[in-house]
Image: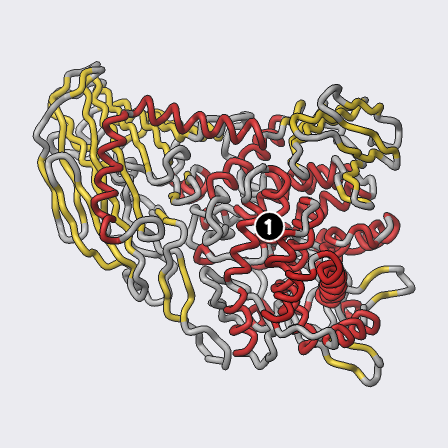
Amino acid sequence: MKRFLKTDEWNIIEDRFRSSKQRASESIFSLGNGRFGQRGNFEEGYSGDSLQGSYVAGITFLDRTRVGWWKNGYPHFFSRIPNAPNWSGIYLRLIDEELDLAQWDVKSFERRLNMKEGISYRDFEVTSPKGHSLRVHVEHINSMANQNLCLIKYSVTSLNYEGKISFVPYIDGDVKHESSNFDEKMWTILKVETANEYAYLWTQTKREDTQLCTAMTYQLFKDSKELTLSPIKIEKEKLTGFSAGADVKPGERLTLIKYTALVSTLYCDRKQLVEQSIAQAQEAKSKGWELLSKAHKKVWEGIWKESDVVIDGDPEAQQGIRYNIFQLTQSYRGDDPHLNIGPKGFTGEKYGGNTQWNTELCCVPFFLLSSSKEAARNLLLYRYNHLQKAIENARKLGFKDGAALYPMVTLNGDECHNEWEITFEEIHRNNIIAYAIVQYTVMTGSMDFIVEYGLEMMIAICRFWSQRVSFSQPKQQYVILGVTGPNEYENNVDNNWYTNYSCIQTLKATLQYLELAAKNYPDQYSDLCRTTLFEQKETVRWQEIIENIYLPQEKERGIIVQHDGYMDKELNVVADIPTEERPINQHWSWDRILRSCYIKQSDVLLGLYLYDAHFDSETVRRNFQFYEPRTLHESSLSPYIHAILASRIGDMEKAYSHFLHATRLDLDDYNNEIDQGLHITSMAGSWLAIVQGFAGMRMENDTLCFHPVIPKQWNLYRFNINFRERTLQVTVEKTFLKVALLNGKELNIQVHQVVYVVSEVKELTVLMHDTFLT
């Protein structure tokens, strides 16, 4: 853990310039709006170590696969969201010097991310090598009100300099994607043009036909008076921009406002692309900074009204949970089923911006419960739209008859991962998609999605499992061989418990909902059977697998066994590892990791969390006490699961510790990797740790239930959930649980076996008795 940021409930603050932390800070101060985003790079030139990163959602580059040893089934391309043209650049020049924080003397420095407003601020004082001193103030907005706009206000006050200050706002298409396999340039420059009032860069991704036009214009002010100047036009092969400035004396201020529009062929006809980008940039200028920033702030006001979590008494937890909600929301707005959420969002290049199973595990339940919008449905539609490619993916691996294996890593539905132990073996990913479909159906109380889309996906997934299992003659049971579970520190194992158990639950749920569809939606059921060529006889084998699959366990200890052979390992605990050897993935050989008992994230505990209704508290307690000491949490998906289970068994010390780990994973850089980008998808886990963990929210017999506890560090916590066209505000205090119905019809909820009616007429207040307190 390497904390260097100040604690503030609504702001992320770095109070001095740290060149050694530059990449980490660029990740932390990233901005986005669902359609595009960028790392927190400096707008001015910076010659120090930096990862310049700007990204546009939905635009891909097919990077040729690079492996040392090719295997049948490997994809030929690794899809990436390419590092886009740099649209935020503003060079700042004096007569014969250019601002560079790596070379100039930084007297004071603060950058602040205001999460309430969604605006990044930066203030610093610098002195050039020739002794010229300036005070600089920067505001940066990626507009949530108009998702094609980036707005930057860059103000410079002379402290002792007399002469001309010039701004050079530019768009640079000569960008490098640092993690590309063959160091290729990913964009073709179609056209560059600079006119008196605007400039634009028109580009197209190589090997793809998606186009992006980035256009800009600007305003220049001296103190509060706008200047009308004829700028110097800059037009190069891959760069466009202006040079504009004025003479200043000490105490005078120049301000440049840069208006940039990013328009792609994902949302605009290519024949109108250039025209639209120019028009939107100029329209932004005509509206002006104040009007545009006000509209942006208003959107954030609405977001926080709906999704804010209040924690009283713990500023670090409060800052962390708001930061995670902020980053999740600006990474994905939920309005386009063609988009999804990369593990790093718009904050770095690792994982290529591709979708993984993190989305269904963490983000679908977050958006399903925290937002009234159709975000969760669109995330599931994303998978439905890729169903035929999932069937094709399975066919390439030898499966047939409409079996589907969803890709481990993808942007467009094609598998693009090429590590055999992941690509071919981490097949549990299929089940979390089925799980998310069922959760959506249960929490919305509607069969519409599962009947129209979900069952078609679930049938294809069940067909995969029907072919993937083997029948063991010695065991006289079905087994699943040669897999990698969620714990990627063990590869190519047999009978990973989580994989086997989630396979059963997928088959069971599919049978259940097929029966309901046949009974209650006969027309849609007939269409489904015709579309999928589904025959009832398939279910005979599914039922046989359900009843006869092997699930490893250790009866003497009363625990579930992670996989065959796990108990043969030396069962050490994490506390035995020297601190200087953590994280082990940065210090140990892969061979040593695979032979150890240490767990990246616990497969067994994940299963106990997802299928919590199937296991009593004692079963959870025994397994938690065995696996928790052996879990390293070197996966971002791990800490929040442990926080939820620890809450369930009443171990509040561990519940709080794991919650803080999940919540401040990036802010405090627990795993020493924040320079690569944030853990966007797992950020939803910290929200789930409050709602499903501390508040104990779950469904029981089609009733919304709460089993609340409160950490001793807190005075209260409060959150909203959207449930079946209702918005509930839940407040947990030391002595009371309060539930208010903010909108929608009255409903029944259950608090520790007692059913209450919640209506808009009166807030429900339930006394917190001893079983609630910790």
Residue 545 lies, with reference to residue 740, above or below; the image says below
Res. 537 visible in picture = yes
Quick one: SS at disc 1? loop
Residue drawn at point x = 31 percent, y = 66 percent = 207
Between residue 390 and residue 88, name the one nearer to us: 390
Residue 663 lies, with reference to residue 543, above or below; the image says above
Res. 486 visible in picture = no
Q: Picture coordinates of residue 32 (x, y %)?
A: 42, 40
Which image quadrant is residue 120 in?
Answer: top left
Residue at the far right in the pictured view: 556
Residue 48 lies, with reference to residue 758, above or below; the image says below
Between residue 143 and residue 44, name the one nearer to us: 143
Whether residue 548 sits left or right of residue 535 in the image: it is right
Whether residue 346 sits left or right of residue 167 in the image: it is right
Q: Picture coordinates of residue 67 (x, y %)?
A: 44, 74
Q: How is the image coloured?
A: secondary structure
Image quarter hosting the C terminus: top right
- According to the image, label 1 marks what residue? 636
Which image quadrant is residue 18 in?
Answer: top left
- Give the amino acid type for the residue marked by disc 1 in the picture: Ser
Residue drawn at point x = 59 percent, y = 80 percent = 400
Q: Picture coordinates of residue 529 (x, y %)?
A: 64, 69
Query: Crowding near pointer 1: few (<14 within 10 Å), some, many (20+)?
Result: many
Residue drawn at point x = 79 percent, y = 34 percent = 749
